[in-house]
Amino acid sequence: MAKQTQNIRDDAGLLKKLLEQMLLIRRFEEKAAQMYGLRKIGGFCHLYIGQEAVAVGAINTIDLKKDYVVTAYRDHGLALACGMDPKRVMAELYGKATGCSKGKGGSMHLFDAERHMLGGNGIVGAHIPVATGVALKISYKNEDGVVLCFFGDGAIHQGSFHESLNMAKIWDLPILYICENNQYGMGTDFSRVSSVTDFSVMGASYGIEGKQLNGMDVIEVYAEVDRTVKYIRKNHVPSFLEIKTYRYKGHSMSDPATYRTKEELEDYKKQDPILNLKSYMLEKSMLTEEEFKNIDKKYRSVSEEAVKFAEESPEPPIEDLYMDVLA
Amino acid sequence: MPTITFREALRQAMDEEMARDENVILLGEEVAQYNGAYKVSQGLLDKYGPKRVIDTPISEEGFTGIGIGAALAGLRPIVEWMTFSFSIQAMDQVINNAAKMRYMSGGQFAIPAVFRGPNGPAEYLSAQHSQALQSIYAHAPGLKVVAPSTPLDAKGLLKTAIRDDNPVIFLEAELMYSLKGDVPEEEYLIPFGKAAIRREGKDATVVGFSKPVTMVLTSADRLAKEGIEVEVIDLRSIRPLDEHTIYESVKKTNRCVIVDEAWPFTSVGSHIAWLVSKNCFDYLDAPVELVSSEDVPMPYNHRLELAAQPSVKKIESAVKKVLYIEQE
């Protein structure tokens, strides 16, 4: 294990890719926040800032030709990490016809059938059985795929989570349940509403192994998810990871996050996944300040272009209202 | 034509579709080793094995969602609910996921899944096991809702449901499983959205679906002896709804009674009554009547539970009412 992590630490190409994707998400989300403030984006908008290492570390270990991603409504970061076009994602936030869901889904319902990104689901925990059903299909068809099912600390107390883990175990389904514990279910500190504070034990009742990871460290996330996915692929069993992370913004754009202290937020910002990876790469001469600035500039510009694309895209025609209700 | 039961007709439909398409699987409580709580899936485990006929734990939300996920990824699952009363546990999965994932993804996905089981009042089961829930499922766009009344329709409609690329809610009934009827040996399908005229008549139209259709036909026979000729329309599917057949009949008879064993408030029956009132306004010679269950939870006592439901007598009274026939 240590050796594998060291290999990742030495892989400048991989680290640069992870850094770039995290920067893409960070700059995209900052732009989304800005456009939300300008009322270009409406409704609920749950930003991923602070959690980038989870999506990027995890999704880079899988092959979306055979593997699948299913997540909840804090989905922008996961969608971008799956390789979805930032323009079409931003257009979806704008509700435009060019959006990845043709403007019918919005921020919470990003989907990409081709990239096996199955949402973008809005009801807390309700996508966990759906993800488990995708794993049932993989198993039934004797395919080689694995499902990554992401959900937050708020979802772990839903019956859907517990029912799914039980069935995934009795049917040996190839699925990795990933609890992105950002420590607040909306405004509620997870420790106030959970009988245990170490969620990695939650799979144990169902005979499913669990482990807790530091979600502010993209190398740790990548290494552990990679190891776990390989294990699932080989042994056809479900597994569970709790990845501890932190969102810098409120639950959604309307939440000023007064339930936590400035000190706590500042503490986490010191562990920022992007800045930490950057420091490490600078130290190891895998990156220069100049290169970092250029990468950052590139993704600021990608986000600007995404906004421009969304701004210039047409509204869906009214006739689309009744389209795609039924197949 | 062989005479078989409603239960056998459903089994034949699943058996034929499982033989035809290996993407069809069946999952639910007691469907495999126990051969089905109502023996609908009898023999399917032996024939298709445990990979395709899957016993689930008592986890309605979980296994319903698993069926939806499997459908999203390309299988054609049949999810059996031991009763629709238990489907309330799974309703979030059906209404928020199955019905909406296609729309909110801009048409990227289809959910070819069937959710089936007994619905509606049974006998001596009281409030939590004896209720008709079609109004709730029919309310949500993105679902099809099917309600056969005969073994022949049950088989043809279930085969269509399994081949449909949309989520289909398929309503059966405990008290219909032993109902017998003629079913052809050769393969056939029955399309959705085509009502059947079970009996022609000129005096009044009675619209029904599922189990109460048998009761409607008994009422029609009895009324015929009094010289009243009732036209009986069996909807077969609630969504899509064959409005055309209903309106053509009402335009001929000028009078309409709807029979729906759900509660009366915001039901399929009350909706159809509104549609007929609106679309056949100029043809109606009397207000549309609705025969529903009483607006109470189902009582256990047999006398009370029968009083709570539509009956032959209630249907006859409603027909006489729209005909302005004096009743004692």
Image (cartoon, coloured by chain):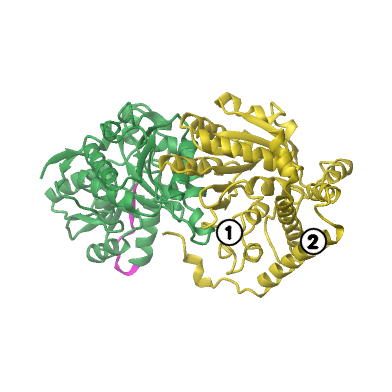
Chain colours: A yellow, B green
- In the rendered image, residue B203 lying in the magenta stretch gets the answer no
Count of marks overlaid on the render = 2
Q: Position of residue B312 (x, y in %)?
A: 24, 42
Local crowd at mark 1 within 10 Å, few (<14), some, or many (≥20)?
many
Identify the residue at image location x=49%, y=59%.
B108
Inspect the image, locate mark 2, and give the three-letter code of the amino acid beneath it.
Answer: Asp
User: Which residue lies under the disc numbered 2?
Assistant: A296
User: Which residue lies under the disc numbered 1?
Assistant: A105
For the N terminus of chain A, give its image quadrant: top right
Q: Quadrant of residue A296?
A: bottom right
- Marked residue chain, label 2: A
Q: Position of residue B77 (x, y in %)?
A: 38, 44
Identify the residue at image location x=23%, y=43%.
B215
Residues at marks 1 and 2, CA–CA distance in whole angstroms: 29 Å
Q: Is residue A169 visible?
A: yes
Camera-side residue of A69 and A218 = A218
* Outermost left residue: B1
Mark 2 falls on what kind of element? helix
Q: Are marks 1 and 2 on the same chain?
A: yes
Looking at the image, is A111 positioned above or below residue B306?
A: below
Camera-side residue of A87 and B3 = A87
Q: Position of residue A47 (x, y in %)?
A: 72, 53
Q: Quadrant of residue B192?
A: bottom left
Inspect the image, locate mark 1, and give the three-letter code of the amino acid beneath it.
Answer: Gly
Q: Earlier in the sequence, mark 1 or mark 2?
A: 1
Camera-side residue of A122 and A283 = A283
Q: Is residue A154 visible?
A: no
Looking at the image, is B126 positioned above or below residue A294?
A: above
